[in-house]
Amino acid sequence: MAVMLSTLEEESDMYEVFPAHVDTSSIPIVPDSPAKKNAKPLKSWSEISSLIQAGRKRDVKLILREQGWPTNHTIRAQLWPALCKQHSSSRPMQDGFYWELVNQLFGTTDVSDKPMLLPAFVENTHCLPYHLTRRGRSLADRVVCVLGFSCPDITYSPALYPIAALLLHFMSEEECYNSLASLISSKDKTFITQTKLLNEATWRTVMLITKKHMKSAAAHLARHCSDARSERIYADWLWWILQGLPFTHLVRVMDCFFHEGIKVLYRVAMAILFLFYKYSTCQSSEWSAELAAQGVDNALTKFCRQMPVSPTKVLRTAFSVRGLSSSYIQRVFVKTEMLLKSKPVLSNSQQISRSRSSENLPTSQSQNNIQLVSHTLTIREGSRSPEPRTHAMGVYPIYKIRSAIVSQEELFTLWSWLPVRITMYQPILLYTTEEHGCSLTTFYVRVEQHEPTLLMIKTSNNEVFGAYCSTRWYERNVKDDRGNRQAYFGTGETFLFSLYPERAKYPWVGMEQSPGEKQLNHSAELFLAADHKMITIGGGEGQAIWMDENIRYGKTDRCLTFNNPPLCASGDFEIRVLEVYGFAGA
């Protein structure tokens, strides 16, 4: 049972832990579990801090998973900002930067009593305040508004508001903004999805990995509802955690989330389904009766709210799932994203048709749609302005490209094939043989640190083809545990394309696999390879694109990774122009 703090000493501790914008009277403090006789003392902030500074991420991870700090422990005021800060991919935020943005946007740093118009990416039904006071909610509103102003490429992110509210329970408004900015900008891990397509990819990922790794729990859910209803339940997976779990459980989950990323939430969602299955299959249990009376979706929601096990038990169940590595989850997620990308997408609440000709290419109607959508997929151009956002942005990135290889029409085709999130970034010409010469060394110097890159080739016979390379070329230098350089690198998001004489996209063959199909052979997962003598894209019984060290001659053949035909008629080609583009801020 949850107990409210009653003594003056305990109340004093509460006020020392929580900022003034938190309603401490409503926060239940639940002992995580009975203290064991030989239980080790809880880790202090200084111990955790030294591990973070030393880069000992695995040690920090193991500690966070097991440390049962109570909700009112003082450590989170320092721990959460530090955990978030370590993921930032940009320079440290300057002191006062947040307040400059607040002044630009609102004209004052005073908190208004009037309700704020929240960004379009927020879902009003999921603006969860938890235990924030009225002023605390206004601070959460303001943080989210400033994020919407400074990060215009966020188009749909319902989880952002509740995460902001949770952060505000243990830190100041400025620290909350800086922490969220670090999570959003992280390149190594995913924390918060920022588009509707990626949001859908997350719940479908949860559904797929649950069906594979928690078969009994997934089957239990399927027995009690139709496939369509089952999908709707999975679509709410994030709210099982952020809206359903008791606050004491949620805080412990967030301890791990701020260090490890969204994979923690995937695991916790699977743990919830497993525990629900375990508690509701016993015919004499209250949850079995609840399931029969209320239906699986209502019973699951109530189960989350009244979680019958401790936070430690939830986390141990979550992290006991075997074979669920970060790389595996990422592969499932990318594959799901690409499958969704091939379907109609929504923009500005209107369906944008992706009509195709018989060659699976954009028709004139779909190209018009791309131009229509382009006004919403804008980017920042440097100066910030308190005026309406459209005045602070540049035009759609495609119009800035002046290519010696492709026309604007061909660029529209190519842009429709890119991952949606990448189309929002400004393309930058990193390397061209016309300006930088024909040298593989120069190619690496100018290109290798950028991810992703778009490589386009025009041959002496005017054939045009290339590849979207999802991984930076510097990966060619990464060594395995034995000190050997890896022959191939890259991910399944890489794809080939041809623009002349034929237009076609050749995605990784794994994208077309059904979840239950046999695992691909290694020869169908050879994406990129490079050394000081050559560059190869696509392998397995042939090389889709191969170029020599002088970036002058190359060859192309069918390969198993992309199941592509040779990209030019003769198979051998001479390079007239090579262009490589990166994406600013990606």
Image: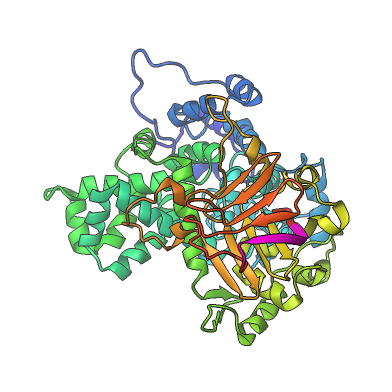
Q: Kindly report the secondary structure that dominates the magenta region of the rendered protein.
A: strand
Q: Is residue 27 visible?
A: no
Side (left or right) of 455 relative to 188: right
Q: Confirm whether the magenta stretch covers residue 575.
A: yes
Quadrant containing the N terminus is top left
User: Colour mode?
Assistant: rainbow
Comparing 268 with 22, the one in front is 268
The picture quadrant where one finds residue 267 is top left
**Of residues 355 and 322, which is closer to you in this image?**
355
Q: Is 517 above or below relative to 487?
A: below
Q: Is residue 431 visible?
A: yes
x and y, in percent, of residue 323 in the image? 37, 39
What residue lies at 65% left-to-right and 35% top-to-bottom?
Answer: 477
Task: Give the residues drawn in magenta, as a range.
Answer: 570-580
Residue 393 image point, x, y percent: 80, 67
Q: Is 32 displayed left or right of 291 in the figure?
A: right
Q: Where 23 sits versus 143, above or below?
A: above
